[in-house]
Image (cartoon, grey):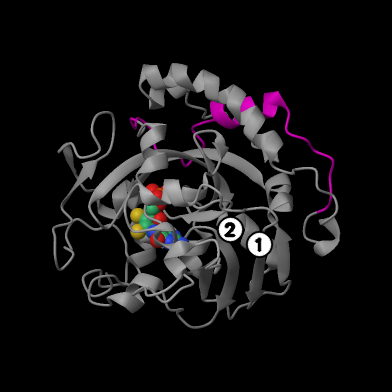
Amino acid sequence: MLIKSRPSWFLSENDATPESIYKQRRDIVKKLGIAAAAVPFASQTHAGLFDVFSSSNDKVTEQDSRMALEGASSEFSTKGLALTPENKVLTYNNFYEFGTGKGEPAEQAKNFKTTPWTIEITGEVAKPVTLDIADVMKNMEIEERIYRHRCVEAWSMNVPWLGFPLASLLHLVQPTSKAKYVAFETLYDPDQMPGQRGFSSIDYPYVEGLTIAEAMNPLTLMTVGLYGKTLAPQNGAPLRLIVPWKYGFKGIKSIVKIHLLEKQPPTTWNLLAPDEYGFYANVNPNVDHPRWSQASERFIGEGSVFSSVRQETLMFNGYGEQVASLYKNLDLKRNY
Ligand code: MTE
């Protein structure tokens, strides 16, 4: 795993997090070393699968691990945010393949097997590939980004994710000029995912999509960890998408396929309730969900998950400066 070196615009963690969490994170540094070692970074056996990554003998050193955390504020990290405590990010989840209750994914995904794991990238690309997650972890430059995370259900968190820009991955496979959209697919494995067995209103596998411009935006993060550790199953291990200016349901978990195409791909929540969930799903306090307001959100921080601390929802979840130009010719009321 290549860790981005500390940039000149580095913001110390104490600027971004409460002091208690800042101190707590000293311990996480040590844990990351352990978590990182658990991932088969040095698997050279898959290096021949494709030629986009040259094989290397890079190993994650404790120094690298520390960099991942101390370089917390990448250029794209959101400054001055109080983090949602780690235990809440790990226990208050939406991952319907493992149950519809907020606490169910953490329970039911405990034994979810994420190795071996491959990700196929196909469609309108010059170099279609099948990547082993171990090679992805080893070769991509991982950085930590603190992002706002806003669910369409009107709750929100601030999460320190670890990942790399989706654009870096797409550049490797060289999209053709016909690639206008990027489609994503979650693993389909009813043996492991109880929500995929029997009756469900969702037609699995869970699918999502972005326009190519959204996919290439530097904020769009392929995410492999949070709070300095590899992703827990309930958060979408081993690889999920995070698009911070969109509602959380765009952040598809446990990805096995990425397909570039000319036409807009179907997306799970849009298929299920097209009047409620659009393709774009940009966070927008001025466009309500048909059944509730989107003007404010319940921020999950310290204290009870059900506490009524409400805050105003920001247009594009606060990322307008970086993404508003993508939608300058789009009617955001119709294209919700
Ligand atoms: N991905 C899959 N495969 N299945 C899901 O049910 N839920 C989505 C998204 N990704 C979901 C998914 C929703 S509704 C949200 S809000 C986020 O995951 C929640 O991510 P978190 O549990 O890490 O906070």
Query: Does 144 appear in magenta?
Result: no
Secondary structure of the magenta portion, mostly? loop
Locate residue 231, reporting x and y percent: 54, 44
Q: Judge whether 273 appears above or below 28 on screen.
A: below
Q: Which of 330 and 296 is in front in this view?
A: 296
Locate residue 319, reporting x and y percent: 35, 49
Q: Say which element carries label 1.
A: helix
155 left or right of 191? Answer: left
Q: Nearer the viewer, residue 21 or 87?
A: 87
| Amino acid at pointer 2 | Ala
How many numbered tags mark residues here? Answer: 2
Q: Quadrant of residue 289?
A: bottom left
Q: Give the range drawn in magenta.
A: 54-82
Please tell me how crowded label 2 is: few (under 14), some (14-19), or many (20+) other residues with Cα within 10 Å. some
Q: Quadrant of the C terminus?
A: bottom left
Q: Residue at x 23, y 71 (%)?
A: 276
Question: Does the beta carbon of the residue at mark 1 sit less than 8 Å from ligand 1?
Answer: no
Q: Which residue is drawn at 53% across and 37% down?
A: 144
Residue occupied by mark 1: 171
| Amino acid at pointer 1 | His
Q: Quadrant of residue 331?
A: bottom left
Please tell me how crowded label 1 is: few (under 14), some (14-19), or many (20+) other residues with Cα within 10 Å. few
The numbered mark at residue 167 is 2
